[in-house]
Amino acid sequence: MSYTPQVLVAGGQYNITPRLVHMVGPTATVAQGNLDTLTSGTGVALAASPANALAANRRYGFATTTGANNVAGMRNTEAMVIIGSASPMGGFKMTWRFGLDQGGAGARAFVGFHTSLSAFPFTTTDPSGVAINMIGMGLDAADGNWQIMHNDGSGTPATKVDLTADFARNITSMFELVLQCAPSATALVQYTVRDLSLGYEKTGNLITDLPAGTVVLSPVMEINAAATGVIQRICHIHRQIEAGPF
């Protein structure tokens, strides 16, 4: 949780080494120094199997019950980042590998950053329908494809970028989400999404409807079922966050 300031060079520029905020593998959250908190749902370590590319990886699954709006997932209370308002403040890069391996239809899901430290915000409402600072990859109950979702916390719905049928909700794909931005007074968040099972990739830049530069963002993975009778499970494979100084 520290960074190394280097020599102040000509022109008043700082060269500051990014700090590795957090790295979490596919093990129980309590083994990660209690930085992540499983606040709802059933968590279970899953062994690798040859069924598909997602199942071929050791992973940690978070499963809902069959009740409507039951929530499962992991949220973080210490691995926080900011976009930044001017260099060298802020900036980050997050890489998260994950996938759905149970349920699928009707699931609400979100993987990325938001500002809620006390609870999962997407319980009885679609992720895009909550007025919260957020940047990530999500599913509303009616979405057939994964979406990039971002919001500056001032209203709803969140801005959504449809990742198309290449990134349809399914229970076999392993996804990789990369979110990154440089410390700058001009907000620009770059996203790269890959389906590591099928070989698809989408990239883009987000320049509007983003959290303010000094808003503290925390990583979250959440899933819930919009209707009764369906168990939904999202699987965490690996997450790494690098960030500049606050």
Image (spheres, rainbow, N blue to C red):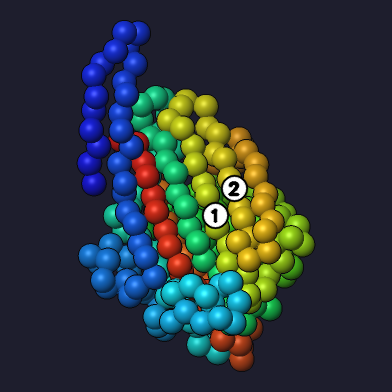
Report, in whole angstroms, how far the alpha carbon at label 1 lies from the one at label 2: 6 Å
Local crowd size for mark 1, using a 10 Å CA cut-off: few (<14), some (14–19), many (≥20): many
Task: Give how far across and how far down residue 154 sits, in percent.
Answer: 55, 46
Q: Residue at image x 58%, y 45%?
A: 191
Q: Residue at image x 23%, y 46%?
A: 1
221 and 240: which is toward the camera: 240
176 and 38: which is toward the camera: 176
* Residue type beneath disc 2: Thr
In the rendered view, tell whether residue 90 sits above or below residue 68: above
* Residue type beneath disc 1: Leu
Secondary structure found at label 2: strand
- In the image as oriented, which residue stretches furthest toward the right? 165
Q: Earlier in the sequence, mark 1 or mark 2?
A: 1
Q: Residue at image x 48%, y 72%?
A: 57
Left or right of 68: which side holds 26?
left
Left or right of 27: which side holds 130?
right
Q: Residue at image x 56%, y 86%?
A: 231
Query: Which residue is disc 1 drawn over?
Result: 177
Task: Give how far across and how far down residue 138 sits, in percent.
Answer: 60, 61
Q: Is residue 223 visible?
A: yes
Local crowd size for mark 2, using a 10 Å CA cut-off: few (<14), some (14–19), many (≥20): some
How many marks the image carries: the answer is 2
Contact between marks 1 and 2 (CB within 8 A): the answer is: yes
Query: Which residue is disc 2 drawn over?
Result: 192
- In the image as oriented, which residue stretches furthest toward the top? 10
Task: Give how far across and how far down residue 153 sits, in percent.
Answer: 52, 48
184 and 213: which is toward the camera: 184
